[in-house]
Amino acid sequence: MMTPRTGNRGVAADFRSQSTFRVAVAGAMLPERKAWLANAVLLAIVIPMSWNGLNHALTARVVATLLAVSVFSAIFVRIISEQQKRLQALAVTDPLTGAFNRTLLERVLDEAVQQHDRSGAAMTLIALDLDHFKAINDSLGHDAGDTVLVEIGALLRRRVRRADKVFRLGGEEFLVFLYGTGAEQAATVAESLRAEIAAHRFLDDRAVTASFGVATLQADENWTAWLKRCDRTLYRAKAAGRNRVAT
């Protein structure tokens, strides 16, 4: 009478350990949604097998163990998933201004070009550069300059839509990508941003202004040529006296 019971427990222990391992691996190695699905499928297979092959007491222990492992695996996957999202966000975000950095720029602009080629949707870039920003750093210090950059980043991100993107290209230069926006509407947006920046009191003792260049994507233009043309338009605004929009 004792031999079958001992064998049954040995089989149960081996079966439970193998199933537990599979559940843990499924939870740890897969994306969160797929991990939930894999665990559900595994439990749907294992529970009937254990019910038919083991006595009810051992089956209850196997099921309890697998459910516990599934719960802890789900918690672990959720934590890992959230950490991955935070790391991905940090990798593409400028830590000072909260705007995107250059890491994401090529992908966004290349996808915009492809979308334009497929559907003809208008895509426009607005480049802006803060006027005489070096003088702010030299006379008031880099802390004052950083304060201006932080507020500029917040202003731009507040003004754009969810489909649009704001990039900090470096120093005091920013780039706004406007999805589905033509030249005339983008020029209106740029002028509105220029006026808001000029009217905003970033510093107590001086005004802060910015120059803007607007470029709408043209047929058969790649993203690098598009960006360079936007830069040239910005330089025209600065050469014409700054604190203005060039198209």
Image (spheres, rainbow, N blue to C red):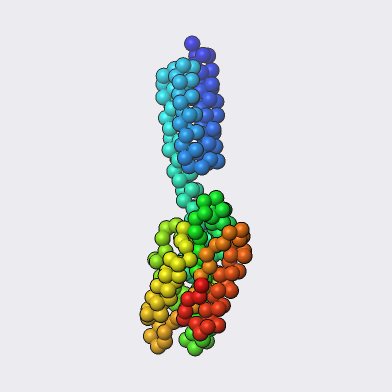
Point out residue 177 in the picture as x, y percentages from the top left corner: 49, 63
Point out residue 155 in the picture as x, y percentages from the top left corner: 41, 70
Residue at the far top: name it: 1
Residue 105 seen in the figure = no
Q: Is residue 151 left or right of residue 235?
A: left
Give 109 or 24, whichever is nearer the viewer. 109
The answer to whether residue 225 is above or below residue 119 is below
Point out residue 20 in the picture as x, y percentages from the top left corner: 51, 32
The answer to whether residue 160 is above or below residue 50 is below
Q: How many marks?
A: 0
Residue 185 seen in the figure = yes
Picture residue at 54% right of the left edge, 32% below the top: 22
Picture residue at 61% right of the left edge, 58% below the top: 220
The answer to whether residue 61 is above or below residue 96 is above
Picture residue at 50% right of the left edge, 60% below the top: 123
Give 113 or 59, whichever is nearer the viewer. 113
Examine the image and state in which quarter residue 51 appears: top left
